[in-house]
Image (tube, rainbow, N blue to C red):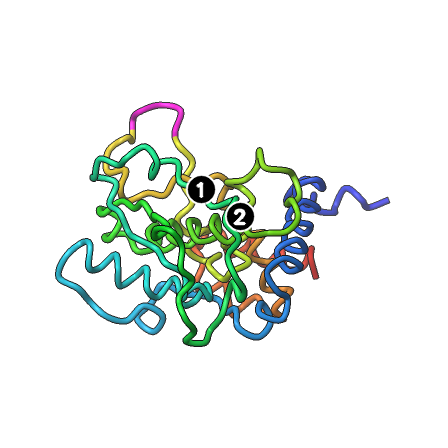
Amino acid sequence: MFSFLKQAPLLDEASVEWMHATFDWASEQFGEAFFQQNTQLVLPDEKHFPGRADSYQAMAELIFGHVKQYAGMGHWQFELIPNTVCLPEHLEDHRIESTAIPSPLRSTQTIPAIVTDQPLPIIYDPSQVNNPLAMIAGFSHSLAHYLGTQAKSAPPGGAENWPHITELLAVFMGFGIMFANSAYVSPKSCASCSNTGNRREAFLSQFDITYALAIFATRKGMEAKQITRHLNKPLQGFFKRAMKEIG
């Protein structure tokens, strides 16, 4: 009788089911035990990202070093390459799908580096040093791509949704705050095309990512208040509702 008083679901049912299925896939492929025991909610603060450097490249290297450790991929070989460099064609489309990375894929221990024919390229925008949220999200998205290629089974939704899947994988890896707070959808007009280095173009909306962050928090047994204080204000109420929906 009073159903008209009920709030509509935050997202459509298919999207929510896909997010849960992708988290299940990530857990199966990359370790539920690692997720529960080692994955943390990474925050863009001095505690999680200490240190300063005197150049864009050095600062990017410093930030990336922390991102690698939180992702459990400190033993992988990477090379940071600014997008201002003219890249050889083989680097622009570098893939490792055919390369089997030896176990463990992720570790918090100091172990011998995974040796590949050449370091895996991480292309970045130097101007995003001034926007650490976007830079951290970009780095973790690149790591999620490389990690995701090592899965033994296809992700939900198939390869055509790979950028979206790897954004969810980065949230699963602990970087959801940066993704939610820095998500940016390109405008249809060019009225605000300037200063693009201070934005991160997103594949999933800020609300999709915030819902995924609620899935992360629920699976980690976290309370809403542990996360809401780190979210942009427009996302806080949405996150609380998402936690209740998933609950």
**Disc 2 from disc 1: Cα separation:** 9 Å
Residue depicted at x 70% and y 46%: 17
The answer to which of 218 and 157 lies nearer the viewer is: 157
Residue hosting label 1:
95
In the rendered image, residue 38, in percent from the top left (x then y), is placed at 53, 73
Disc 2 residue type? Thr
Q: How many marks?
A: 2
Residue depicted at x 26% and y 63%: 62
The outermost residue toward the left is 54
The answer to which of 9 and 47 lies nearer the viewer is: 47
**Residues shaded magenta:** 187-191
| N-term mark: 2 or 1 | 1
Q: Secondary structure at mark 1?
A: loop
Q: Quadrant of the C terminus?
A: bottom right
Task: Judge from the rendering whether residue 122 lies leftward or rightward of residue 152; answer left or right.
Answer: left
Crowd band around label 2 with a 10 angstrom C-alpha radius: few (<14), some (14–19), many (20+)? some
Residue hosting label 2:
149
